[in-house]
Image: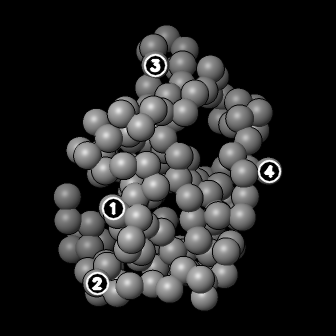
Amino acid sequence: MDLSAKNKIPLLRVALEKVDIFSTEFSSQIQNIVTEHKEPGTGRKFVMFVMPGNRKFDADKIKSHIGLVDIRFATEQEVSEITSGTLPGGVPPFGNIFNLEVFADKALFDNEKIVFNAGDKSYSIDMKSSDYKKVVDPVVADICQ
């Protein structure tokens, strides 16, 4: 899936730049988590949660605001299988390219720019949060502490 051409966003340009994460505001650095949950009537399903680096995943909010139940973190092996070999910590927040539904914390879009790993823990991408929203089209909700 060519996200940059489809959405007219210069992802290639930013993907080639090494971002100094130590000079980047921590709230603009994002983290993502792959989880599995029980979905009433359909069984178990993997999804991705994306949130600012300065916030914490809140299973209770996810249960009450989104309705997902029996949530557990995916294992390293499951993440690798879902992402065709990308290890936790390097998985980019584009769950849609891995056929994962994506839920993003609403605070993610408080920052003009977001920074995240680019498939490898050694390289990062920065992009406008509005462009990220356009490319991924996540379900936006209050999912963090």
111 displayed left or right of 132? right
**Which of the two labelled residues, at mark 1 and mark 2, occupies the earlier sequence position?**
2
The amino acid on which the numbered mark 3 sits, given as a three-letter code, is Arg
**Which of the two labelled residues, at mark 3 and mark 2, occupies the earlier sequence position?**
2
Q: Which quadrant holds residue 76?
A: top left
Q: Tell whether label 4 touches label 3 (CB within 8 Å).
A: no
Mark 1 closeness class: few <14, some 14–19, many ≥20 residues within 10 Å? some
Up-down relation of residue 68 to residue 7 (above or below): above
**Which of the two labelled residues, at mark 1 and mark 4, occupies the earlier sequence position?**
1
Q: Tell whether label 2 touches label 1 (CB within 8 Å).
A: no
The amino acid on which the numbered mark 4 sits, given as a three-letter code, is Gln
Which residue is depicted at the point 72% across and 64% down?
A: 54
Q: Tell whether label 4 touches label 1 (CB within 8 Å).
A: no
Q: CA distance from mark 4 to mark 2?
A: 33 Å
Q: CA distance from mark 3 to mark 4?
A: 25 Å
Q: Which mark is residue 145?
A: 4
The mark closer to the camera, 1 or 3, is 1
Which residue is depicted at the point 54% across and 25% down?
A: 37
**Which of the two labelled residues, at mark 1 and mark 3, occupies the earlier sequence position?**
3
Question: Residue beneath label 3, please?
Answer: 44
The amino acid on which the numbered mark 2 sits, given as a three-letter code, is Leu
Question: Residue beneath label 1, please?
Answer: 119
Question: Residue beneath label 2, please?
Answer: 16
x%, y% of residue 16? 28, 84
The mark closer to the camera, 3 or 2, is 2
x%, y% of residue 104? 58, 54
Q: Is residue 134 visible?
A: no
Q: Secondary structure at mark 1?
A: loop
